[in-house]
Image: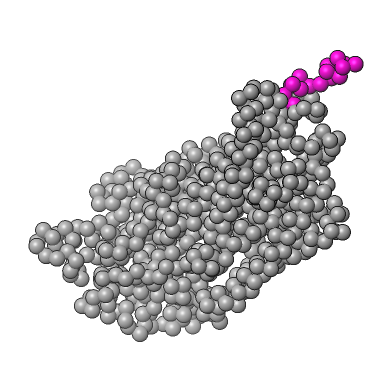
């Protein structure tokens, strides 16, 4: 049923060094502010809160002194073979083949059936279970760059696509080829705000971009490689147990 | 003497089918009233959803599908008696099924419209439901489901229409009489269309889970573009639907205290169910074997990892595979003739199919898709229970009204 990964000339993607991540949550906050993500009155309802990038805490399941833990930021994987796209009955989510391979989400088109959420094994999508609410005064933080979403629709990380559009427009105005953006011309808010420099962004197909080199390193791995979704997001860790925890390996006992 | 018996007849007796008796209007209205109250309670729950969104449900970003989808899948499978019996009666021309065909149509109509009501609540933006037709993604199984269910419901309305026109008072009108008669003549065409549509949407409902290649629990590879669940859902619906109709018909006999369906027709329906379900049992076992030994290891998983605790226990898996037992009972003339075994086998099949839908919706989501996650649990809220349960009084009212005023059981007079 999997139709296979699409061929992309430009493949915008991310590399996250989990060994560098401190779990501070700056990426989550930056994303929340940049993309006008609605607030949850009660954040103890973890599975109801909307967050386009989650920071997961993983541990090796051992006791002190062998105990070890890492923090794993997890935005949308922007899969090359996205499990969520073919299932949407109204084409409210698409794989952008011509603009760098983003998986879009069109909120005004979404009917809220949530089939895409079930199909995505990474849980990268969130549903608006109620009307988005901003406490008094907080509405002043809303930016004009991203439309707010209404209740009853699904939303997800777009790798700050509006920034990509702006970078392309700027290149066009300056008489440059918008398809040949420099590495620093377009980066999502989460990457920009990471204080420990754990998040890298660029064209995974371009050897001149850092992400190309990092994604080819021996410590690079992706989540759930076996399902064949081909994420455009790589993780790096020198820790063997972290790499192993990225997928099921028959003999692996779950931890964390 | 005639005057005395006329006086004893209920006040709405004029509308009854020819030559049958019914309970008093008062008794009937009490039954309808109780059903209506329960139905209105469900309507209030539906209002809560439509007014403020899905916040009142037990679903969350982990469990994006819940009781509603499970209920829809089960109800549509059990309502499949309509399409499959229609196919056998009108296309394969098995005339004995005339004695139960009306019930299958009404039950199918009730199940499908009930499922559609719940489906409207299920989507977050019900006012955009028409987008599925306008912006249809032909690759999505859900698109196929929505198209086929909607069109098939229209077919069921057309199949229901001759029954409504068969009302004694309506039938006096010459035009309506002719319309009903002519609809009867063209019914094989609609039965054929219904069988085609229903086959595809039963399959697509199975395909919904089977195509999700990102989730090993659901994924089933397949035959060309169709996952195995596509075929398993069609076959299990065709197999359980007829026996579900028999069970409902028998329940109506108990309530009314009358003989409504000849025993030989029940036995025939049992034989049909048994035949289809034995095929299902074989194919389902093959699918399970291949899933456990082929697909799961390919994803780095083991069979035992797929089960957890009581709600997601392995016993459900083995119970699903037990379809062989009721199927064999229904296929053995001696055992089938025993009414207790006949009805027990029917209940057994209904449970198997319903639990299969539960597993294909809930258990698959509960399973940790990523190795560092844990099993999750989901509990429907009163809103979800109420909106699902309101379909029961809806079916009771529909069947009650149809039984009282329309010739639902054409051989009722002869049987009593």
Depth check: B339 or B294 in front? Answer: B339
Q: Position of residue B186 (x, y in %)?
A: 61, 40
Residue A173, magenta (yes or no)? no
Residue extent of the magenta highlight: B1-16
Q: Residue furthest left?
A: A175
As drawn, B140 above or below B33: below
Depth check: B66 or B96 in front? Answer: B96
Tell me, what colour scheme is on the image?
Answer: one colour
Please indicate whether residue A160 sits to the left or right of residue B250 in the image: left
Residue B4, magenta (yes or no)? yes
Q: What residue lies at 76% left-to-right and 19% top-to-bottom?
A: B11
Q: Position of residue B359 (x, y in %)?
A: 61, 61
Q: Where on the picture, by quarter, is residue B259?
A: top right
As drawn, B73 above or below A9: above
Depth check: A47 or B250 in front? Answer: B250
Q: Where on the picture, by quarter, is residue B308?
A: bottom right
Q: Position of residue B14 (x, y in %)?
A: 74, 21
Magenta residues: mostly which secondary structure?
Answer: helix
From where the camera sits, is residue B75 visible?
A: no
Q: What residue lies at 22% left-to-right and 65% top-to-bottom?
A: A186
Q: Position of residue B210 (x, y in %)?
A: 54, 63
Q: Residue furthest top?
A: B3
């Amino acid at each position: 049923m999997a139709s296979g990964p699409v061929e992309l000339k430009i493949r915008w993607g991310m590399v996250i060094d989990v060994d560098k991540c401190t779990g501070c949550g700056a990426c989550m906050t930056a994303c929340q502010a940049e993309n006008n993500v609605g607030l949850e009155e009660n954040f103890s309802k973890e599975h109801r809160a909307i967050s386009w990038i989650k920071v997961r805490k993983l541990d090796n399941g051992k006791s002190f002194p062998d105990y070890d833990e890492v923090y794993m930021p997890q935005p949308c994987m922007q899969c090359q073979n996205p499990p969520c796209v073919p299932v949407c009955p109204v084409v409210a989510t698409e794989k952008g083949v011509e603009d760098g391979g983003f998986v879009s989400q069109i909120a005004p088109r979404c009917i809220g059936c949530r089939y895409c959420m079930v199909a995505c094994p990474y849980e990268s999508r969130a549903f608006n279970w109620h009307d988005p609410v901003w406490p008094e005064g907080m509405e002043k933080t809303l930016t004009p760059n991203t439309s707010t979403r209404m209740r009853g629709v699904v939303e997800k990380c777009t790798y700050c696509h509006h920034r990509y559009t702006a970078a392309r427009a700027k290149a066009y105005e300056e008489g440059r080829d918008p398809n040949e953006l420099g590495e620093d011309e377009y980066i999502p808010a989460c990457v920009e705000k990471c204080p420990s420099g754990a998040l890298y962004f660029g064209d995974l197909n371009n050897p001149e971009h850092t992400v190309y080199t990092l994604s080819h390193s021996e410590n690079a791995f992706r989540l759930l490689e076996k399902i064949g979704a081909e994420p455009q997001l790589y993780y790096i860790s020198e820790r063997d147990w972290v790499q192993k925890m990225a997928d099921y390996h028959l003999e692996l006992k779950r931890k964390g | 003497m005639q005057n005395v018996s006329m006086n004893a007849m209920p006040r709405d007796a004029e509308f009854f089918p020819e030559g049958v008796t019914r309970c008093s209007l008062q008794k009937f209205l009490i039954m309808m009233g109780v059903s209506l109250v329960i139905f209105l309670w469900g309507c209030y729950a539906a209002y809560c959803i439509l007014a403020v969104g899905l916040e009142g449900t037990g679903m969350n970003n982990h469990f994006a599908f819940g009781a509603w989808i499970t209920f829809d899948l089960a109800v549509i499978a059990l309502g499949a008696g309509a399409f499959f019996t229609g196919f056998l009666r009108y296309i394969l021309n098995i005339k004995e099924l005339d004695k139960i065909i009306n019930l299958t149509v009404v039950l199918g109509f009730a199940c499908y419209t009930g499922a559609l009501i719940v489906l409207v609540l299920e989507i977050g933006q019900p006012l955009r439901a028409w987008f599925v037709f306008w912006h249809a993604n032909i690759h999505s199984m859900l698109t196929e489901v929505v198209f086929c269910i909607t069109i098939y419901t229209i077919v069921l309305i057309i199949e229901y229409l001759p029954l409504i026109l068969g009302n004694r008072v309506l039938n006096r009108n010459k035009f309506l009489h002719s319309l009903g008669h002519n609809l009867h003549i063209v019914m094989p065409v609609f039965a054929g269309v219904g069988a085609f549509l229903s086959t595809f949407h039963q399959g697509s409902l199975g395909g919904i889970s089977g195509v999700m290649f990102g989730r090993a629990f659901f994924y089933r590879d397949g035959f060309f573009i169709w996952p195995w669940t596509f075929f398993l859902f069609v076959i299990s619906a065709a197999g359980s639907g007829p026996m579900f109709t028999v069970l409902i018909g028998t329940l109506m006999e108990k309530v009314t205290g009358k003989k409504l369906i000849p025993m030989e027709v029940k036995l025939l329906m049992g034989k049909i169910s048994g035949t289809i379900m034995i095929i299902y049992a074989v194919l389902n076992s093959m699918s399970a074997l291949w899933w456990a030994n082929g697909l799961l290891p390919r994803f780095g998983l083991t069979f035992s990892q797929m089960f957890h605790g009581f709600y997601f226990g392995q016993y459900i898996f083995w119970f699903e595979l037990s379809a062989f037992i009721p199927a064999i009972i229904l296929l053995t003339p001696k055992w089938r003739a025993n009414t207790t075994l006949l009805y027990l086998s029917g209940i057994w099949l209904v449970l198997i199919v319903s639990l299969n839908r539960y597993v294909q919706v809930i258990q698959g989501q509960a399973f940790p898709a990523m190795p560092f996650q844990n099993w999750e649990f989901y509990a429907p809220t009163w809103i979800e229970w109420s909106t699902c349960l309101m379909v029961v009084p809806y079916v009771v009212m529909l069947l009650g009204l149809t039984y009282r005023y329309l010739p639902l059981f054409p051989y009722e007079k002869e049987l009593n």
